[in-house]
Image (cartoon, grey):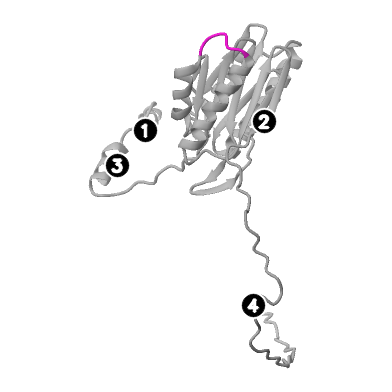
Amino acid sequence: MDLDMARDLPRAGFNFENCKRNATLLSGGFKPPTTTKTGTTIVGIIFKDGVVLGADTRATEGPIVSDKNCAKIHYLAKNIYCCGAGTAADTEMTTDLISSQLELHRLGTEREVRVVAANVMLKQMLFRYQGHISAALVLGGVDKTGPHIYSIHPHGSSDKLPYATMGSGSLAAMSVFESRWKPDMSEEEGKKLVRDAIASGVFNDLGSGSNIDLCVIRKGSVEYLRNYELANKKGERQLDYRFKHGTTPILHTTVRDLLVTERVQVVPMETS
């Protein structure tokens, strides 16, 4: 009896039984549901004395711009910040959760949190959900070992790079970095480079837009530059559309008295 029950247990590992069925459906003209893509341009670079993070401020719901001034640079620790691309709720809740875990880690160890610790916590959490949390992150910070930039993908992989881009405008931003980034840049050069990278995403990607946010992290200090540049400034109205009284003539006037009557009708309620 026990042997028969053991034989009925499913085999461990992945199951690919539906692959043939899916291929048959696709060959017959079936259109599978598509994923919802959100637009963002987020970047980060290492300069001589720290890191510079940048992001646009457009939040979209498909073809609709839902928020023109969304903050995409999130606080993790005093020396660590994180840019988020993907579903706004997922990036917000993920960074909030890891921020609380990093604070507990700091209190438990009684020392400054290292950037690699934040990277490990984020990638382990995202890998646990196998990519179903739509959060693509650019992590940046400065600790006792120096400045660090990590790019973390929704399925849990990460890369340690001198500069990183994520989001739908990442290719346009990466073209700016690959042509102009150099080691040991000054802070002003780094800020201008990040600004230009975000602007390239804003003006070449429909999912990115509105303003440019920057965050400069140095050893012992952080400068969060909200709305560092208004890349898409709203145009000012040049003409006055208010007209003087009498500009349009009144041809005739008709006044009608309206008789309004009210009636209250009692409707019995069924109790059965």
Label 1 and label 2: CA atoms lie apart by: 44 Å
Q: What element carries label 4?
A: loop
The mark that comes first in sequence, 1 or 4, is: 1
Residue located beneath label 2 in the image = 96
Q: Residue 248 carries which label?
A: 4
Q: Which class describes the residues within 10 Å of circle 2: few (<14), some (14-19), or many (20+)? A: some
Residue located beneath label 3 in the image = 22
Label 1 and label 3: CA atoms lie apart by: 26 Å
Compared to 241, does 114 lie above or below?
A: above
The answer to whether residue 20 shows anywhere in this view is yes
Residue located beneath label 1 in the image = 8
Q: What residue type is labelled 2?
A: Asp
Q: What residue type is labelled 3?
A: Asn
Quadrant showing the N terminus? top left
Label 2 and label 3: CA atoms lie apart by: 38 Å
Compared to 216, does 252 lie above or below?
A: below
Label 3 and label 4: CA atoms lie apart by: 67 Å
Q: What element carries label 1?
A: loop
Asked if marks 3 and 4 touch (Cβ < 8 Å), the reply is: no
The mark that comes first in sequence, 1 or 3, is: 1
Q: Is mark 3 on a helix, strand or loop?
A: helix
Q: Is mark 2 on a helix, strand or loop?
A: helix
Q: Which class describes the residues within 10 Å of circle 1: few (<14), some (14-19), or many (20+)? A: few
